[in-house]
Amino acid sequence: MKPTPSPRRVGHTTRPRTTNPSFLSSRSRLFLVCDRVHKADTTSLQCGIYNLAQDYRSQLPMWQDDIGRISRRHLHAVRVKGFKVLDSKYVIQFLLSKGNPDSS
């Protein structure tokens, strides 16, 4: 008998594999990321989504379009919502852990 796959947890959204180029394009997902980072430390907000995109554009060539899409389409919406990014390395680490099954 084949082992049955474990059922998905209710309320847990799994990120598509990296074959889906638009896994970061959802506005709600971006807000969720920003909200978590914002809550981590509200005393030293260092950079915005645009800087995050520019800093890591060359390091994530397969995700260039996704990162660019965040900066162009959602930067204004994120500002309006009041979310800020604490640390670009933290955010990239979060995105990698959610979007890339090969990352540690």
Image: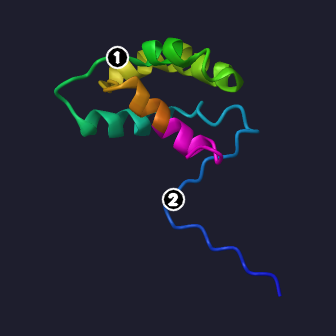
Measured Cα–Cα span from mark 1 to mark 2? 28 Å
Position of residue 7 measured from the top left corner of the image (x, y, whole percent): 62, 73
Q: Is residue 10 visible?
A: yes
The quadrant where residue 39 appears:
top left
Residue drawn at x 49%, y 14% as measured from the top left: 55
Please tell me how many numbered marks the rendered image carries: 2
Residue drawn at x 22%, y 34% as measured from the top left: 41
Q: Over which residues does the magenta segment extend? A: 94-104
Please, what is the three-letter code of the amino acid marked with disc 1? Cys
Is the C-beta separation of discs 1 and 2 under 8 Å?
A: no
Residue drawn at x 60%, y 20% as measured from the top left: 59
Secondary structure under tag 2 reads loop
> Residue most toward the front?
104
Is residue 86 magenta-colored? no
Q: Quadrant of the N terminus?
A: bottom right
Residue drawn at x 43%, y 19% as measured from the top left: 49
Comparing 45 with 7, the one in front is 45
Position of residue 30 measured from the top left corner of the image (x, y, whole percent): 47, 33
> Residue most toward the left?
43
Please, what is the three-letter code of the amino acid marked with disc 2? His
Q: Residues within 10 Å of mark 1 (few under 14, many from 20)?
A: few
Vertical side of 94 occupied by 101: above or below: below
The quadrant where residue 79 appears:
top left
Q: Which mark is residue 12?
A: 2
User: Which of disc 2 and disc 1 is earlier in sequence?
Assistant: 2
Vertical side of 64 occupied by 23: above or below: below
Position of residue 98 measured from the top left corner of the image (x, y, whole percent): 55, 45
Q: Is residue 29 visible?
A: no
Secondary structure under tag 1 reads loop
In the visual, does 45 lie left or right of 30? Answer: left
In the visual, does 59 lie left or right of 21? Answer: left
Question: Which residue is labeled 1 in the image?
Answer: 47
